Image (spheres, rainbow, N blue to C red):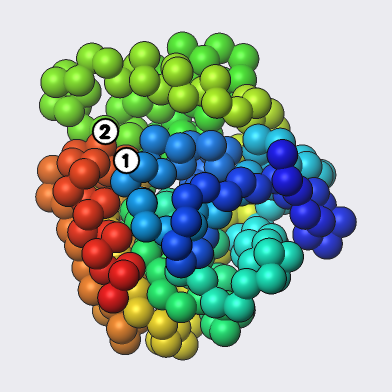
């Protein structure tokens, strides 16, 4: 599997499909393989996805993993592949990395989709403390007791009525965990330490590329008020709100939601 060196840290990446390059950035403590179920819905693009440091087959160095550092990883991947400008799609923490990438390296980002993410900082709409605790604790459990970890994380990702209507979700998540090595229990703590200092709100006006903000109206991990904050501050932004969806908004209507996203990306 291909890797590149980002300031001495080996980062694993994969490329699938053909078309204009689309860099996919995954969220909190999840490997790049978490994009696999969505790749068929992103047809027409050359999808480039990677394991953020601390996940999958990428190195797992010591210390906090800051958003700025992970944005440099993404920038270095674009450079390593000999690409000039790419479309970017980041989900949750991946959306934070995408924001920082566009601010630090605007010449590399043609347009971007920011899914279920936040600008951070004092004005961000924070989730309940118990939600954050459950997210970190559940993520750490995944490598040691996957079933217990899923039980803890599942109600954070989906509204209760969606879980009741889809009993197959647990099995689907369990199967997904076989696609990549488990994330070490140390990684969520390193990510949480790095995310604590993330803040782009006062810099969002500097983003000049077109932006689509996508968010679930029932998201409890990243409350939907954060989508409005980003939309207000980014000049070339449009908001796609999915009222009945939770944090994992693509599950609400995988085909329809991705058709809307890919149509926008082709403009």
Q: Marks 2 and 1: CB-CB under 8 Å?
A: yes
Tag 2 residue: 158
Secondary structure at numbered mark 1: loop
Q: Which mark is residue 186?
A: none
The reply to whether residue 145 is visible in this rendering is yes
Residue that appears at 75% across and 48% down:
3
Residue that appears at 23% across and 14% down:
167
- Would residue 256 be found to the left or right of residue 78 on screen? left
Q: Residue furthest front?
A: 18
Q: Which x, y percent locates residue 112?
A: 41, 69
221 or 234, nearer to the observer: 234
Q: Residues within 10 Å of mark 1 (few under 14, many from 20)?
A: many
Quarter holding the C terminus is bottom left
Tag 1 residue: 248
Quarter holding the N terminus is top right
Q: CA distance from mark 2 to mark 1?
A: 6 Å
């Amino acid at each position: 599997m291909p890797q590149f060196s980002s300031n001495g840290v080996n980062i694993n990446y994969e490329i699938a499909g053909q078309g204009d390059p689309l860099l996919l950035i995954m969220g909190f403590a999840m490997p790049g393989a978490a994009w696999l179920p969505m790749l068929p819905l992103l047809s027409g693009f050359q999808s480039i996805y990677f394991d953020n440091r601390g996940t999958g087959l990428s190195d797992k160095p010591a210390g906090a993993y800051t958003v700025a550092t992970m944005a440099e990883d993404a920038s270095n991947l674009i450079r390593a592949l000999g690409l000039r400008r790419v479309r970017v799609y980041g989900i949750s923490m991946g959306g934070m990395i995408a924001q920082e990438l566009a601010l630090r390296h605007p010449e590399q980002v043609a347009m971007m989709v920011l899914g279920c993410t936040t600008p951070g900082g004092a004005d961000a709409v924070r989730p309940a403390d118990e939600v954050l605790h459950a997210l970190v604790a559940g993520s750490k459990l995944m490598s040691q007791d996957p079933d217990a970890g899923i039980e803890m994380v599942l109600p954070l990702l989906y509204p209760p009525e969606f879980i009741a209507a889809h009993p197959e979700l647990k099995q689907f998540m369990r199967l997904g965990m076989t696609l990549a090595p488990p994330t070490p229990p140390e990684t969520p703590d390193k990510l949480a330490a790095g995310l604590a200092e993330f803040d782009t709100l006062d810099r969002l006006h500097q983003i000049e590329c077109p932006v689509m903000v996508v968010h679930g109206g029932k998201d409890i991990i990243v409350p939907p008020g954060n989508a409005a904050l980003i939309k207000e501050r980014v000049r070339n932004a449009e908001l796609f709100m999915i009222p009945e969806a939770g944090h994992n908004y693509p599950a609400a209507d995988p085909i329809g939601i991705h058709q809307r996203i890919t149509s926008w990306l082709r403009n």
